[in-house]
Image (cartoon, rainbow, N blue to C red):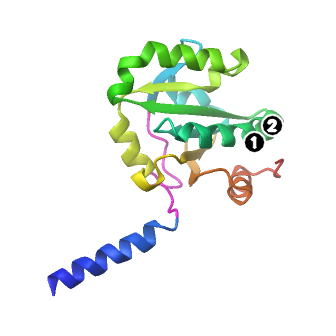
């Protein structure tokens, strides 16, 4: 009987988690947890402080493969948020493990590959990977997803999502931000 219940629990968990749930560990209405890193400009970065007074979309990536999903989202966010003075975004690669050995190489490569005017929109986080994976609801099945958190002017979470870019998710994010979509 216990084995059957365990199997049913696993099956139920698999079905529920296959529906791209909201991020685990954080929920709408929570204050965004303190995240410390460094802007590509070299300045220390702390979220949600760096976004104070503005809505901000935080795009987390945990793997090299997630870079594509994060960049696809960022390409759409830049023009949509450019028209909104009280909005910004942050691309946040969260790196640890063996990647730390290549910190200088990785940071300098990102600086070279990112236009200077966007250096204050990229925050590299070296460490705390397990904590942020748990907060974001990271799963191996979705390891190359972008994990997105929209926060308000006071750092409260307005919207959560993980996955590749989609027009439907973009519209939901814009609706949560309170302005018309500009895809």
Q: Is residue 174 above or below residue 20?
A: above
Which x, y percent locates residue 133? 39, 44
Where disc 2 sits, the SS reads helix
Left or right of residue 108, residue 53 in this image? right
Q: Residue placed farthest to the left in the image?
A: 2
How many numbered tags mark residues here?
2
Mark yes or no: residue 44 visible. Answer: no
Q: Residues within 10 Å of mark 1 (few under 14, many from 20)?
A: some
Asked if the stretch drawn in magenta spans residue 27, the answer is yes
Q: Residue at x 40, y 47 (%)?
A: 135
Q: Per the image, is 171 magenta?
A: no
- Is residue 66 something one can see in this rendering? yes
Name the residue that disc number 2 marks. 79
Q: Position of residue 178 (x, y in %)?
A: 75, 51
* Residue 156 quadrant: top right
Position of residue 126 in the picture relative to residue 107 (left or right):
left
The answer to whether mark 1 and mark 2 are in CB contact below 8 A is yes
For label 1, the residue is 76
Image quadrant for the N terminus? bottom left
In the image, 87 versus 154, the foreground residue is 87
Task: Give the x, y percent position of residue 169.
Answer: 67, 57
Q: Position of residue 79 (x, y in %)?
A: 81, 37
Question: Which secondary structure, mark 1?
Answer: helix
Magenta residue span: 20-34
Query: In the image, is residue 38 above or below residue 14?
Result: above
């Amino acid at each position: 009987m216990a084995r059957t219940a365990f199997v049913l629990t696993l099956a139920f968990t698999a079905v529920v988690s296959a529906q791209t749930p909201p991020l685990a560990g954080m929920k709408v209405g929570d204050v965004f947890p303190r995240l410390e890193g460094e802007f590509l400009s070299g300045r220390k970065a702390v979220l949600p402080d760096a976004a104070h007074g503005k809505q901000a979309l935080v795009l987390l990536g945990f793997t090299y493969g997630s870079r594509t999903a994060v960049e696809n989202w960022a390409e759409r966010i830049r023009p949509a948020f450019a028209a909104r003075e009280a909005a910004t975004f942050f691309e946040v690669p969260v790196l640890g493990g063996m990647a730390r050995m290549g910190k200088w190489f990785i940071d300098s490569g990102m600086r070279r590959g990112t236009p200077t005017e966007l250096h204050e929109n990229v925050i590299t986080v070296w460490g705390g990977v397990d904590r942020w994976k748990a907060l974001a609801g990271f799963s191996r099945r979705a390891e190359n997803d972008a994990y997105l958190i929209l926060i308000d002017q006071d750092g409260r979470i307005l919207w959560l999502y993980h996955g590749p870019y989609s027009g439907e998710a973009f519209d939901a994010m814009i609706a949560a931000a309170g302005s018309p979509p500009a895809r």
